[in-house]
Image (spheres, rainbow, N blue to C red):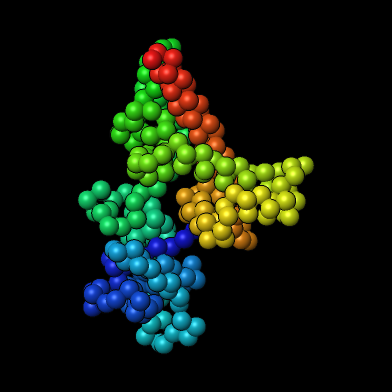
Amino acid sequence: MKLVLDRQDLRPEYQGDNCSSTVFEHFTPAAQVLIRQMDQATFEDHDRLTNLIYPPANLDAQAIANIDEAMKTLWEQAQPPDEIMVTTQLDQAERTDAQLQGQTRRLPDQFGPIEQYENKEEGEAGDGSYTWEGCYYENAVDLIQCGFLRFCACGSPEENLRYIRQALQLIQRRMTEGDPLYDWRNYEEATGSFYHTEGAKYFMYYWLDSMGLTDHGTQVPGWLTARGEQLILDIDLALAASNQKTENSNGAS
């Protein structure tokens, strides 16, 4: 679990300080309790600047007294740590769109399977459109590209989804015994041909991990999560539907 704090978790006198100058002592006692429990936290500013916060090795007597008092209060209120009012990733997911402007956009709690979001009556064929989290999407490509992944629909969404799918499949094959890419030398050769640069490769690894599509493990790329496995299937369906629509359109003309 990653602990993310923002300016609401700072003491009032420090809420105007620069992100880079923020340290453990600037946070409220309740936030300090969590930082000590987690051993570190990420302080995230509104303009997406971040700063890692670590508890000091040695606390002075007053700091210890403040933290102990905060912990005592929390126990008296019978609040488990996940109910303490600090800004975690879950808290950010529950904020309104207006509050989220300029901050981390909400990542979906779950991807697919996309069939459950299709607009159709039971036992009847749908029109290929979807509704997810209150938003209408004309087709499955838009649902994944703009809904699940939070990209815009400019350019070539289909090619983007193919690229993401292949990146996921490479990692999937890397962890499949009997597959040629299970041999790390073959995997490195395949990823070299696919990404062409180390920067492109590691950007994809970091992005997949941040989206919960891979599990970091000891180091990236790790392995696919259930969400990553499902996204491959969803992209398969979306691209198949897109291809079929193109073929139908060409046939009609």
Residue shown at 42% from the left, 60% from the top: 81
Depth order, front residue of 36/108: 108
* Position of residue 159 in the picture relative to residue 24 (left or right): right
Total numbered badges shown on the rendered structure: 0
x, y percent for residue 232: 55, 37
Please indicate, yes or no, whether residue 79 appears anywhere in the rendered image. Answer: no
Residue shown at 71% from the left, 47% from the top: 181
Residue shown at 72% from the left, 51% from the top: 186
- Quarter where residue 168 is shown: top right
- Quarter where residue 251 is shown: top left
Please indicate, yes or no, whether residue 187 appears anywhere in the rendered image. Answer: yes
Residue at the far front in the pictured view: 253
* Position of residue 14 in the picture relative to residue 118 (left or right): left
Residue shown at 43% from the left, 21% from the top: 245
x, y percent for residue 242: 45, 27
x, y percent for residue 159: 47, 39
Depth order, front residue of 248/232: 248
- Quarter where residue 76 is shown: bottom left
Query: Which quadrant of the figure contains the C terminus?
Result: top left
Residue at the far bottom in the pictured view: 60
Residue at the far right in the pictured view: 178
* Position of residue 85 in the picture relative to residue 216 (left or right): left
Above or below residue 226? Residue 33 is below
